[in-house]
Amino acid sequence: MVALCDRCGVREAQYFKVSSGERLCLNCLFNTIEDTVTRTIRRYRLIGSGDRIGIAISGGKDSLVLMYLLGKLRRHGKIPRDAELIAFSIDEGQPYSCVRRSSAGDYIGKLASEFNIEYKLFTFKDLFGVTAFDVAQGLWGKGVNVHMCTICGVLRRRAMNIIGRRLNLSKIATGHNLDDEAQTVMLNVMSNDIKRFAWFGVTPSNDVAEEEFIPRIKPLRFVREEEVAIYAYYHGIPLMTIECPFVYNNPRFELKFTLARWERDNPNVKYSMVSFGDQLSKMINDRFKEQVKLNKCTYCGFPTSGRVCRVCELLNQAGLLEKYLRFTGKVPK
Ligand code: SF4
Ligand code: ZN
């Protein structure tokens, strides 16, 4: 006998929602995902009237589902219709950059235009004068062991702020899902760095060292990764078929499996971890912010909690600092 959906009681149940113990048909699953995202946006006031929201598109399922959902919610008036949406991708300039591996190709532009969203492509080369691969080669050639994901991440955070200012964005939405956020909590605990929780949260100033920081919002942070993947699959959103080889050395990769094992015994473990991170963030945020005094980076002038910002530190180690400073006009040509 066919089990019926616990919500509608009409259609065949096809998905077991571990967190609630419900068996859902796909239609009701999609509705719960859309409701969760709408609730997150409304409850935390992530998008307001007149906001100019940048959508960071890696070309993976999470960012594409994010664009799809924001477009759909705006169309249906569930988020302000006058909120502007501008999608952008960043090509880090290494052979496995997300946008290069993405099977989405033309799909990104098509999806954007379907929802009346402008789409732009930026590259590290255009923004910094060097690619992630140049930086990696410089570092590794000098025997400095820095993971490729760190290079991508440090430069991408700076790139997003530069792009945000260029496009006059009020906020940047990223596709982080519940699993990403739970992993971040674990990584912060494992690195014994409680201050990092000051940048955790639903509306994090997760880059306190970047002046004119464009606030980040994460509308998918209460949706499990598996549910994002199913939503993508049944809405014709292409899934990434090639993994970046560097991801296997990234601690997040192992944590995926650890969390999946824990979830078998405690179906709400990911929600609990994110909630714990949020509470901790709230508790320490004010106290930590008082302790952070920003200086201007000696080289590029971007604010930093130390003397030299992380971007200049990496580029200096890679022997590319002068090239970068000349490119960005910080040193007379
Ligand atoms: Fe960069 Fe790491 Fe993503 Fe690969 S997995 S594109 S190295 S951030
Ligand atoms: Zn700097």
Image (spheres, grey):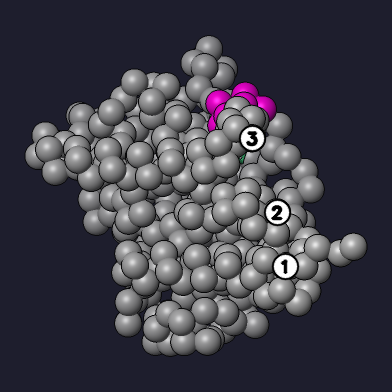
Q: Does the residue tagged 2 have its C-beta within 8 Å of any atom of ligand 1?
A: no
Q: Nearer the viewer, residue 181 or 110?
A: 181
Against 93, residue 24 (above or below) is below
User: At which x and y percent is residue 111?
Assistant: 66, 75
Judged by its main secondary structure, the magenta piece is: helix
Q: Residue at x 73, y 58 (%)?
A: 15
Q: CA distance from mark 2 to mark 1?
A: 10 Å
Between marks 3 and 1 in the image, the one whose residue lies nearer the viewer: 1
Q: CA distance from mark 3 to mark 1?
A: 22 Å
Taking the image as drawn, is residue 326 in sight? Answer: no
* Residue 33 position in % (x across, y down): 58, 65
Disc 3 within 8 angstroms of ligand 1 (CB): no
Vertical placement of residue 162 versus 332, above or below? below
**Which residue in the protein does label 1 denote?**
5
Answer whether residue 149 is magenta in the image: no
Magenta region: 248-256
Residue linked to disc 2: 16
- Rounded to the nearest whole Å, what is the CA distance between mark 2 and mark 3? 13 Å
Quarter holding the C terminus is top left
Instruction: Name the element at disc 3.
Output: helix
N-terminal label among 3 and 1: 1
Q: Quadrant of ligand 1?
A: top right
Residue at the image point whose x is 39% and y is 21% from the top: 191
Horizontally, residue 295 falls left or right of residue 71, namely left
Residue furthest out toward the front: 1
Q: Residue at x 28, y 50 (%)?
A: 205
Q: Which mark is residue 328?
A: none
Mark 1 surroundings: few (<14), some (14-19) or many (≥20) residues within 10 A:
many
